[in-house]
Image (cartoon, rainbow, N blue to C red):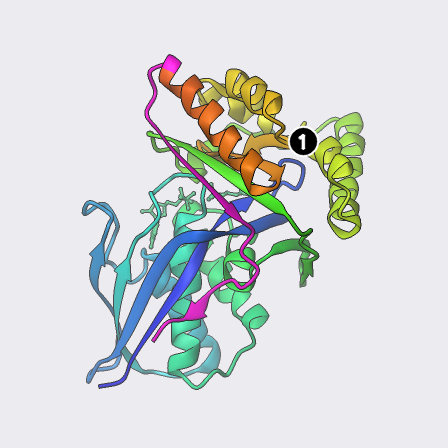
Amino acid sequence: MKSVKAFAPATVANVSCGFDILGFAIEGMGDWVRLEEKDSPGLEVVSITGDEGKLPKEVEKNTCSVAIQAMLDHLNVEIGMAIHLEKGLPLGSGMGSSAASAAAALVAANEFLGNPFEKKELLPFAIAAEKAACGAGHADNVAPSLMGGFVLIRDYHPLDVIKLHVPKGLYCTLLHPHFELKTADSRSVLRDSIPLKHSTIQSGNVAGLVAGLYEEDFDLISRSLRDVIAEPYRSILIPGFNEVREAVKAKGALGMGISGSGPTLFCLSKGEEKAQAIADAAEEVYQSIGLGVDVFFSAINTRGGYIIE
Ligand SMILES: Nc1ncnc2c1ncn2[C@@H]1O[C@H](COP(=O)(O)OP(=O)(O)O)[C@@H](O)[C@H]1O
Ligand SMILES: N[C@@H](CCOP(=O)(O)O)C(=O)O
């Protein structure tokens, strides 16, 4: 029986200043999807592990099946596939959990069908899945989960996606406090319009961050990790936000922000040693406020989703 298995990584969306337009992929954490040939046509989500029974198996709700169905509709193909999902990522974490499932499913399905698409061409199908999961078709998780590295979504209509340079020695520390924050809820606290002066500040920082990545200028990256659009409203939902920022800055973090829509926080740093020191310092703060946390650090994943077997 034909069977294909793929992995897709966790991601940090927004990267502070790039609301819905910037994201990067993490090494060592993600979701796995195995597809098996099925006699009857149509998709079926057969098994899900690692989700404590919380995820939907309905084809129109699970991001794996929504993404694959969008791909099959585009190709006008009817085929039978059984979907097995292994969740490595916590739900509602801000680490692109719904996106990693969709990306792994698409990489597997593409292989299953003989690779009719380049990775970038899989994006619209992954965006359809994000829309089903949280009501917004944002691409800043699915794009880096598929393609790896830092990705800029210059425009959504039409989709214009650019893979950016990753400076050598750039590390990310992730701090995942033990509670769930749904992207849909975290989007609902945002404002529909922003003052002109905030638009100016935010544009300057996006441009500065992109330039900093290409120039491998860590000071410029540090100065640019600032968000005046989403963070002021979302940080209120995350206990210990200011204390953690102070502690990680003291350990040399280039910056700290909300990973995606939270509650996970991300820090960027130069070198693995600092990433470790930052993780330790943050863990102490969470302990002092009595909130359980998982800390993790890694280099930037430049590969994105890939076939395992
Ligand atoms: N395969 C999947 N993995 C994770 N969440 C999924 C999946 N399929 C559907 N969902 C739905 O997506 C929502 C979680 O997505 P979201 O809040 O964006 O979390 P995250 O930031 O971790 O991706 C939940 O309502 C969940 O039921
Ligand atoms: N740009 C989106 C990113 C959501 O990321 P997630 O990992 O929390 O799903 C947003 O900020 O809402």
Q: Is residue 173 magenta?
A: no
Residue 55: image x %, image y %? 26, 49
Query: Is the residue 31 above or below the residue 190 in the image?
Result: below
Question: Is residue 87 among the parts visible in the rendering?
Answer: yes
Secondary structure type for disc 1 = loop
Q: Nearer the viewer, residue 218 or 21?
A: 218
> Can you say which quadrant of the picture contains the C terminus?
bottom left
Question: Residue sitting at 39 percent across and 73 percent down?
Answer: 108
Q: As drawn, is 222 to the left or to the right of 234?
A: right
Residue 84: image x %, image y %? 25, 65
Question: Residue sitting at 19 percent across and 85 percent down?
Answer: 39
Question: Quarter-wise, where is residue 66 in the image?
Answer: bottom left
Tell me the magenta residue range: 288-309
> Can you say which quadrant of the picture contains the N terminus?
bottom left
Give the crowd class for mark 1: few <14, some 14-19, many >=20 residues within 10 Å.
few
Query: Is the residue 206 above or below the residue 198 in the image?
Result: below
Q: Is the shortest distance between ligand 2 and the CB of mark 1 under 8 Å?
A: no
Q: Is residue 290 magenta?
A: yes
Q: As drawn, is 23 to the left or to the right of 145?
A: right
Q: As drawn, is 124 to the left or to the right of 221?
A: left
Q: Residue furthest front?
A: 273
Q: Nearer the viewer, residue 151 or 131?
A: 151
Question: Is residue 188 among the parts visible in the rendering?
Answer: no
Total labels drawn: 1
> Which three-letter amino acid code belongs to the residue tagged 1?
Ser
Question: Quarter-wise, where is residue 162 in the image?
Answer: bottom right
Q: Which residue is mark 1?
A: 193
Question: Residue sitting at 32 percent across and 60 percent down?
Answer: 60
Residue 239: image x %, image y %? 43, 19
Residue 286: image x %, image y %? 40, 20
